[in-house]
């Protein structure tokens, strides 16, 4: 489904600040996998997602999505495969545009855009339906500017936009980290619901070990650009925070990880 | 007495405000929608005027001159966009470079520093002869043109491509992850913006009866002043309001200038007064420490 082969990314190559952000990572996701990724600050989590999405390009290695080699394809050309949510709720939506305008742009992910009307009547009904499922009352506010929404509402809308056209791979980068705990919990539950409902192949980066263990069928721990720990299936189900801390305590200097 | 002297400035303010309204409309597209501080405007305005003046002098039908002026403006805007997106030149500098190059281009096109059009037939000549009071047909014409392009822009910015262009100015990273080539959107948007500006230049040259290589100087600042005035009156929450603000603001700006001149403002101080107006409007929010008023611009 999605294959990452021996990926390597070096920043500021050849200077004293040289930094190997991703150091030979290989990862095979099967269709429907929900992988959580955990690791301390600077472990290379965001860089790995950036390499998969084409925000930056690797020095070595390959990225293959659904049988297509996309390693050097620019970001906008591989958008049709990917849904993506960033940590910052402001990043996922165009704030000066309305809720329905934002949804309609997501609706056309990776498709040719023409001079046809941006929001059509029939699609508007569809947007109302999917917004209703968020249970945030947004279905009555289609023509409201997104700038009027709270962080949690915006991130929920982004989630909807990222999954609207059922991407081959959903990339989530600490997408609940900027929200207050209660809202974060709601958004993560919504994420889990949508991912299961559509059986979406998902990679979710999180700083919260409880989240990483609780959700998904596979967990990967990154450290200094390498995969340190990769656990799935039954073994992951029975995993506890204490056990991870016992085994990797040294690398878990990062308090936040234990959330 | 004083009142009637003010009233007499209304037709000329309307005529000029509507004619220059297309410049403000173009600047709304670059500065507001694309969030791209495009300074090409000073050059592309004169480019439109030069192209139309030269072609009319050569005996071409004025409409051909106008159409080619639009094309030339479009290409000039694309150049600025390409310098920024492909050669990664800072957006302000890209505009200044093209503006500077256009100065030479405009001299080449005209073959000298100005062309008189008073004695030849322009696109506006048949209109002016429609009525003893030339203001009536001329103002109507400029009204139809600027309001027409305002509505066309409104329509465009509600299409799929229009959405993508607005999102490019609002949140480039987001719309790229949705599969839009934001470089293309920037180039296209600047092309459209400068096409409007060049059209305005082409019409103004025929209206005032000459084209001059210096006629575009200060156009960007005047356009910004118009937009700021317009936005203060009609707001900028939607695309429709932004484009309306350009036209309304342009008319009121020209009216303020006309009144100022009547009250004794020296024509030589005009650009200084306009500049001061823009500084005040942009500076007051900063002094009040409002985040809101801060201009969001890309590529600077
Ligand atoms: N554009 C860049 N230029 C230079 N160095 C970079 C760049 N992006 C990331 N790095 C470096 O690469 C390393 C990995 O960064 P990355 O953002 O992938 O970490 P992360 O695991 O996402 O961390 P966090 O949990 O803080 O988000 C860091 O040392 C970072 O400083
Ligand atoms: Mg990160």
Image (tube, coloured by chain):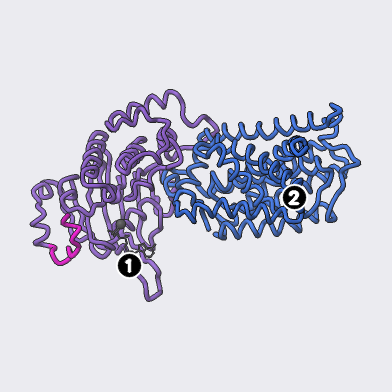
Identified at 8% across, 48% down, the residue is: A238
Q: Which chain is blue?
A: B
Q: Residues within 10 Å of mark 1 (few under 14, many from 20)?
A: some
> Residue A58 — which label?
none
Q: Colour of chain A?
A: purple
Picture quarter containing residue B150?
top right
Identified at 14% across, 63% down, the residue is: A248
- Could you tell whether B265 is left or right of B159 in the image? right
Query: What SS does tag 2 mark?
Result: helix
Residue A95 location, x and y as percent? 42, 42
- Observer-nearest residue: B15 or B193? B15
Quadrant in which ligand 1 is drawn: bottom left
Residue B256 location, x and y as percent? 68, 44
- Observer-nearest residue: A155 or A109? A155
B91 up-or-down from B158: above or below: below
Q: Which residues lie in the magenta part?
A: A248-259
- Could you tell whether A19 is left or right of B132 in the image? left
Q: Is residue A16 visible?
A: yes
Mark 2 lies on residue:
B46
Identified at 60% across, 52% down, the residue is: B278
Q: Label 2 is found on which chain of the structure? A: B
Which residue is at the far right?
B119
Tell me if residue A253 is in the magenta stretch.
yes
Picture quarter containing residue A159?
top left
Mark 1 lies on residue:
A20
């Amino acid at each position: 489904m999605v294959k990452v082969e021996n990926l390597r990314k070096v920043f500021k190559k050849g200077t004293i600040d040289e930094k190997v952000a991703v150091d030979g990572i290989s990862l095979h996701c099967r269709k429907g996998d929900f992988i959580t990724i955990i690791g301390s600050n600077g472990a290379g989590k965001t860089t790995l997602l950036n390499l998969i999405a084409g925000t930056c390009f690797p020095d070595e290695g390959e990225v293959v999505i659904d049988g297509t080699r996309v390693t050097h394809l620019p970001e906008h050309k591989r958008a049709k495969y990917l849904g993506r949510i960033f940590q910052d709720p402001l990043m996922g939506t165009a704030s000066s545009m309305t809720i329905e305008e934002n949804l309609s742009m997501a609706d056309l992910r990776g498709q040719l855009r023409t001079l046809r009307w941006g929001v059509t009547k029939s699609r508007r009904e569809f947007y109302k339906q999917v917004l209703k499922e968020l249970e945030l009352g947004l279905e009555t506010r289609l023509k409201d500017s997104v700038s009027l929404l709270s962080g949690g509402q915006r991130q929920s809308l982004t989630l909807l936009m990222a999954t609207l056209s059922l991407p081959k791979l959903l990339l989530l980068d600490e997408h609940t980290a900027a929200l207050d705990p209660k809202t974060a919990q709601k958004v993560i539950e919504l994420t889990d619901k949508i991912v299961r409902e559509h059986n979406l192949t998902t990679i979710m980066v999180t700083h919260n070990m409880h989240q990483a263990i609780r959700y998904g069928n596979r967990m990967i721990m990154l450290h200094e650009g390498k995969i340190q720990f990769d656990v799935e299936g039954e073994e992951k189900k029975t995993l506890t925070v204490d056990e991870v801390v016992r085994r990797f305590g040294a690398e878990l200097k990062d308090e936040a990880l234990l959330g | 007495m004083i009142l009637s002297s003010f009233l007499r400035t209304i037709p000329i303010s309307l005529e000029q405000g509507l004619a220059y309204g297309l410049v403000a409309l173009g600047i709304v597209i670059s500065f507001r929608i694309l969030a791209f501080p495009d300074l090409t405007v000073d050059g592309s305005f004169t480019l439109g005027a030069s192209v139309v003046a030269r072609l009319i002098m050569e005996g071409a039908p004025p409409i051909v001159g106008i159409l080619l002026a639009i094309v030339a403006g479009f290409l000039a805007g694309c150049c600025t966009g390409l310098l920024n997106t492909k050669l990664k030149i800072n957006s302000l500098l890209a505009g200044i470079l093209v503006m500077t190059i256009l100065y030479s281009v405009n001299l080449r096109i005209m073959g000298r520093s100005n062309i008189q059009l008073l004695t030849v037939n322009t696109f506006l000549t048949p209109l002016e002869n429609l009525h003893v009071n030339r203001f009536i047909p001329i103002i109507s014409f400029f009204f139809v043109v600027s309001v027409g392009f305002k509505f066309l822009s409104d329509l465009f910015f509600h299409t799929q491509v229009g959405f993508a262009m607005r999102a490019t100015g609002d949140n480039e990273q987001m719309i790229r992850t949705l599969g839009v080539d934001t470089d293309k959107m920037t180039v296209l948007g600047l092309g459209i913006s400068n096409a409007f500006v060049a059209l305005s230049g082409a019409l103004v040259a025929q209206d005032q009866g000459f084209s001059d290589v210096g006629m575009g100087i200060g156009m960007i600042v005047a356009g910004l002043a118009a937009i700021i005035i317009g936005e203060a009156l009609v707001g900028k929450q939607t695309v429709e309001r932004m484009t309306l603000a350009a036209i309304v603001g342009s008319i009121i700006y020209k009216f303020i200038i006309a009144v100022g001149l009547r009250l004794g403002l020296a024509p030589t101080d005009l650009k200084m007064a306009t500049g001061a107006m823009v500084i005040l409007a942009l500076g007051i929010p900063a002094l009040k420490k409002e985040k809101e008023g801060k201009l969001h611009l890309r590529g600077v």
